[in-house]
Amino acid sequence: MFTQWFELNKRDENARQFTYSKISIHYVWNQDAKEWIPRKQRRCIGRIVYSNPASGERYYLRMLLNIVKGPQSFEDIRSVNGILHPTFKDACFAYGLINDDKEWTEAIDEATLWASGSQLRDLFVTILLFCNVSKPLKLWEQHWEALSDDILRKRRKLYNYPDLILTETQIKNYCLVEIEAILNKNGKSLADYPDLPQPDQSLLTHMDNRLIREELNYNLQEMRTLHTTLHNSLTPEQLAIYEKVIAAVTQKKGGLFFLYGPGGTGKTFVYNTILTKLRSEKMIVLAVASSGIASLLLPGGRTAHSRFVIPLELMENSTCGIKQKTHLADLIQQARLIILDEAPMTQKYAFEALDKTLRDILGAQDETNRTRLFGGMPILLGGDFRQILPVIPKGKRQEVVHACINRSNLWNHCQLHTLTRIMRVNEYAPDGAIDTRKRLFNKWVLDIGDGNVPASTRDGEDEATWIKIPDEYIVESDTSPIDTIVDTIFSDFIANH
């Protein structure tokens, strides 16, 4: 419709007096012929599709379409008073549609009187992200000296070289690297701002990798002490998977492991034991989870999508957005293990994308890794298929099941380990004897998840989803229900605390 508007202006002189949003008032779009024809009846109010200010040139093109009449090409839209401008943004400046960023310049000038270089860089990134800066390059050129005020001091301290001298170009590069790091934390990059200069890649490859430093920034003595405490508390089931994974890491055998168990069986406890063991030996372990809440339970945890740049819209041939010779690629090459919690929530295509990406990145170090599962990287997955499965918009049950990791070809290479003892409801009495009532309760909870408890329908529902709770698991109360529940579940809480 848009490009055919150019053709309409070429052949119809009357159409040249209207902007794009006004064309639909006087012309109608013929879907079959794919062209605009004069409107003969009824009226129509035209509109232009919304474009976010952060969308760059498309946003500026939309601004121009509200004032430019009768263009016959994209060049005509960028022409102002006979002068062809290189970008739609420059054309907007010529029309006076964009401000001159004076307020952002004054904001940085004022902050320069009291703020440090680090604080000024934070302010600069905030302005880039949220203030719709018209000319980022001009803002950078006016303030780069203030933004890099502490760069030389930081480099001298980092390299333990008090007499270090940096050229102006080097200082600018290091400052751009710092700005890039702040932008990355907010899901952006300097590449999203074409006006701004990019850091010199040769400098980036020789400087310390911030991601690797973060993964090695653990107190080794604290890790050893915590590991001893956790290891001594492992059950035989937990110890088996612990030893299997540690052996795969130390012997560099690779492998795909899945720790399967219902909530409360100690999956996170096993992850933390493995993490403290390897991190106490200065090994890098990437701990991720399918959801942000689950990642908070893992020290140094991140969501899998943010750590491995997994696409949000997954397909069979998807790959992760990680490029060779970047900081993230270097981090993955240095890692010894990946732990991914709540794996059943993630679509199988995400794991297949990670498999292809790891083969590519780790294959750059050793060509044999291109043929190994996950590039030879040991992967520990965990979760419970009784809980949330992948969310498929408007998907039916069979589509949800088909999207699970155990429907992928990767599952054929997976070593499954199961935890059955629920630690959350201890089945043993203080004297060591088995508490039959608690054991039956745990079994009943698992039977619900397995679909073995009879269910009924209510209110004309098609599917039986209502389950009757046995009387022995219901707390009866004659006074305050909340007080009764608290006293029953947390008996002698004050004394034990």
Image (cartoon, rainbow, N blue to C red):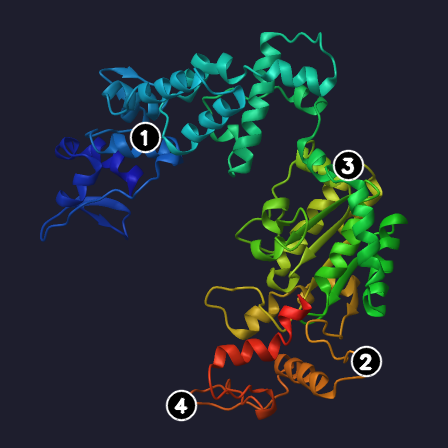
Front-lying residue, 413 or 104: 104
Front-lying residue, 258 or 236: 236
| Eye-nearest disc, 4 or 3 | 4
* Marks 3 and 1 close (CB-CB < 8 Å): no
Q: Quadrant of the N terminus?
A: top left
Q: Which element carries disc 1, helix, strand or loop? A: helix
Position of residue 258 measured from the top left corner of the image (x, y, whole percent): 75, 63
| Eye-nearest disc, 2 or 4 | 2
Q: Is residue 458 visible?
A: yes
In this rendering, the answer to whether 47 lies above or below 104 is: below
Q: N-terminal of the two: label 1 or label 4?
A: 1
Quickly name the residue at label 2: 431
* Marks 3 and 2 close (CB-CB < 8 Å): no
Position of residue 300 measured from the top left corner of the image (x, y, whole percent): 67, 46
Residue 460, disc: 4
Q: N-terminal of the two: label 3 or label 1?
A: 1
Q: N-terminal of the two: label 1 or label 2?
A: 1
Q: Which element carries disc 3, helix, strand or loop? A: loop
Quickly name the residue at label 3: 364
| Eye-nearest disc, 1 or 2 | 2
Quickly name the residue at label 1: 60
Q: N-terminal of the two: label 3 or label 2?
A: 3
* Whole-number angstrom distance, CA of label 1 to CA of label 4: 55 Å
Q: Crowding at label 2, few (<14), some or many (≥20) Cα neighbours within 10 Å? A: few
250 relative position to 47: left or right: right
